[in-house]
Amino acid sequence: MLKSERRELIIDTLRKERSVKITELMERFGVSNETIRRDLVYLEEQGMARCVYGGAVYDFLTTNEYNYSIRIKNNQQEKLCICREAAALVNDGDSIAIGGSTTTLELGRHLARKNRLTVVTNSLYIANEIASNTLNKVILTGGVLSRDEQKMTGPDTVASFGRYFVDKAFFSAAGISEEGGLTEYSEEERGITETLIRQAKKAILLNDTSKFNVTAFYKISDTREIDEIITDWRASARDVKAYENMGITLRRANK
C-alpha cells in the first residue's frame, strides 16, 4: 500500500470514529510504530488530526480551524500571482463562478476592478470584494456557513451552483495528477467543484505546484474535463507538455 493511500484511510477512520490508536493502526497496516507516528504527525501538520498520547483524535472545530489557518498561509505569494493571472482572463460582462478556497480568495480583489460581471460564489469574502464595484452583480449560493472559512458548504451550495451556466469557472482542488485526475479530501468540496466544471463553458483550475502529483481521497473528475490550469512559476517544462498533450492550456504565473 502506498503511503498516501494509508494516510487517506487513517483520515477516513478518524472522521468516522473520532480517534485512532497507534497499536491498532500498526496491526491494520502491518507497519512499524515509527511509520504510524510519522503518518499522524503529518496529518497534524496538515490540520487533519490532533496527536495525543498513544494515537490521534479528530476534533472538528480544532482541526478545521487549524487546517484553515495553515492553508491560508501556505504558498501565499504563489496564490497571489495565480489569482492575478486568472483575473487577466476575465472580460467585462463575463459570467463567472468561483469556488471559495484559500487559493481563490485573492481573486475577488482583482475582479472588483472589472465591470458588469455576473458572479456566483459560495465565498462571503469574494462576494463582498466583487460587489464593492456596484456595476457588478453578485449571487451568493445557499448552504451552511463555515464560520472559519467564511463560505457556504453542503448540498444547497452544490444545488445553487447547478442553477447557473457561466462563461468561466475558477476553482482549486486538493490534488491533481495525470492519471488520478482532480481529487479532494471532502465529499462536500468534491461535489461543489464537480458542479462548477459541469456548468462552465471554460473550467479553470487554480493550483500551485505543491498540489501537483497529489491524489486525495475523493475523485472530482478526469483531468481532461478541465480546460486550463493556472499554476506558479515552478511548474516544470514536463508538466506543461504533459497537460498540453491532453488539450489543456497550462499557464505559469510569474512572481
Image: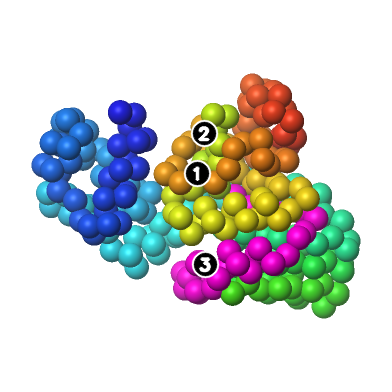
> Which callout, 1 or 3, points at the residue further toward the start of the chain?
3
Q: Disc 1 marks which amino acid? A: Lys
Q: Disc 3 marks which amino acid? A: Pro
Determine the secondary structure under disc 1.
strand
Mark 1 crowdedness (10 Å alpha carbons): few <14, some 14-19, many ≥20: many
Q: Residue at x 71, y 60 (%)?
A: 97
Q: Is residue 163 magenta?
A: yes
Q: Reply above or below: 185 against 1.
A: below
| Residue holding disc 3 | 155
Task: Work out which quarter of the rendered image holds the N terminus and state it.
Answer: top left
Q: Residue at x 60, y 67 (%)?
A: 159
Residue 130 horizontal side relative to residue 10, left or right: right
Q: Is residue 151 visible?
A: no
Q: Which mark is residue 180?
A: 2
Residue 245 horizontal side relative to residue 213, left or right: right
Q: Which residues are magenta?
A: 143-172
Instruction: State the image coordinates of residue 202 (x, y, percent, origin top left).
Output: 76, 48
Instruction: State the image coordinates of residue 254 (x, y, percent, origin top left).
Output: 72, 39
> Which callout, 2 or 1, points at the residue further toward the start of the chain?
2
Determine the secondary structure under disc 2.
loop
Instruction: State if disc 1 and disc 2 touch (CB < 8 Å).
Output: yes
Residue 66 horizontal side relative to residue 176, left or right: left
Instruction: State the image coordinates of residue 134 (x, y, percent, origin top left).
Output: 82, 78
Q: Reply above or below: 173 against 189.
A: above
Q: Nearer the viewer, mark 3 or mark 2?
A: 3
> Which callout, 3 or 2, points at the residue further toward the start of the chain?
3
Mark 3 crowdedness (10 Å alpha carbons): few <14, some 14-19, many ≥20: some
Q: Residue at x 54, y 56 (%)?
A: 191
Q: What's the CA distance linking mark 1 and mark 3?
A: 17 Å
